[in-house]
Image (cartoon, grey):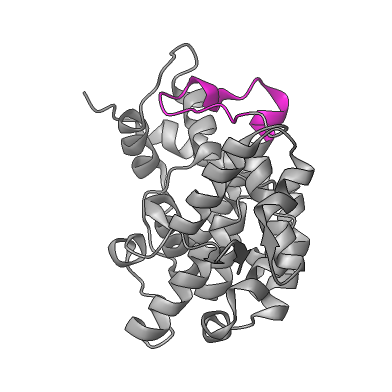
Amino acid sequence: MTRTLPHTEIVAFRKKVYSRYKKYGRKLPWRETHDPYHILVSEIMLQQTQVDRVVTKYTEFLKAFPTIKALAAAPFKKVLQVWQGLGYNRRALFLKQTAEVVVERYKGKLPASEELLDELPGIGRATASAVCAYAFKMPVVYIETNIRAIFIHTFFPKKRKVSDDELVPLVAQTLDKKDPHRWYNALMDYGTMLKEEHANPARKSKHHVKQSRFEGSDRQIRGEILRMLAGTSKIKKVDVLKKFPGEELRVGKILNKLLTEKMISKAGGVFFI
């Protein structure tokens, strides 16, 4: 059953969030623009990466690829080189592929549509909604980990395994439709504060997934392979095994997966980008 909030509760909630934002709101470079491409870059970078790591890389990336057309035309190896340090390197490929599609299909302009953005490589509904809210000021319902933390902490303090289906109506009811850009920025900072002051409320979400350990993981080997290839013209499997001795089977599977994902290419026994 959908929960309906009384108007007084909505007003009080907005007041609390905006009051916190007025006093402690962060000044971040992507908050100073409504350029859809710049906002898309920031949103892709912020997926599973902390804000302080993104700030410098965001500026560096836009300096290297100032427009979506510049990104579409750039060699993937160059994109990967600039991306180094952010992790989850497949996001760099998705971002470049998205740029190529947008240039070809939409004449270099991101569409102001959740549905059309969601169809682009690696974006997904949450990122599509974020771009619509921040770039196009559309009053869309947007759910991500900080927003989950806020709404679970505020409206479901004693419940566990809270579903997004329970949160979406509350996000919609409390949304500041006149200024979704400012409202969602305020929510982001409020959610960050809650995570610092309380055990992360988002862990009570039905959709919460604990991040796996990086050291010794497949992600570490993937990252090292791509770091090596970003810095040189080609490598062999034996070069990777020097860094991960005794992991021949794992390294082989990871190389094959990178080939399948079109992150890397192979000719003979040599891998390259």
Identify the residue at image location x=48%, y=42%: 144
Q: Residue furthest top?
A: 158
Task: Decide which of 196, 52 is in the foreground and name it.
Answer: 52
| Residue extending furthest toward the left | 1
The answer to whether residue 10 of the structure is visible from this angle is yes
Q: Nearer the viewer, residue 113 or 153?
A: 113
Task: Locate residue 3: give its quadrant.
Answer: top left
Q: Is residue 74 left or right of residue 59?
A: left
User: Exactly how many numbered labels are in the figure?
Assistant: 0
Q: Residue at x 47, y 76 (%)?
A: 99
**Is 216 colored magenta in this rendering?**
no
- State which quadrant residue 268 falls in: bottom right
Span shown in magenta: 193-212
Q: What is the x, y in percent for residue 76?
A: 58, 73
Q: Left or right of 238: which side holds 45?
A: left
The answer to whether one can see residue 43 in this image is: no
> Where is 94 relative to 212, above or below?
below
Residue furthest front in the image: 268
Q: Residue at x 58, y 72 (%)?
A: 38
Q: Is residue 32 above or below residue 269?
A: below
| Residue 239 x/y as whole percent | 74, 53
- Whether 145 is drawn above or below 44: the answer is above
* Rendering coords of residue 273 (x, y %): 60, 69
- Quadrant in the picture for the N terminus: top left
Inspect the magenta stretch and tell me whether residue 204 lies in it: yes
x 52%, y 43%: residue: 253
Q: Is residue 104 above or below residue 122?
A: below
- Image x and y of residue 24, in percent: 74, 46
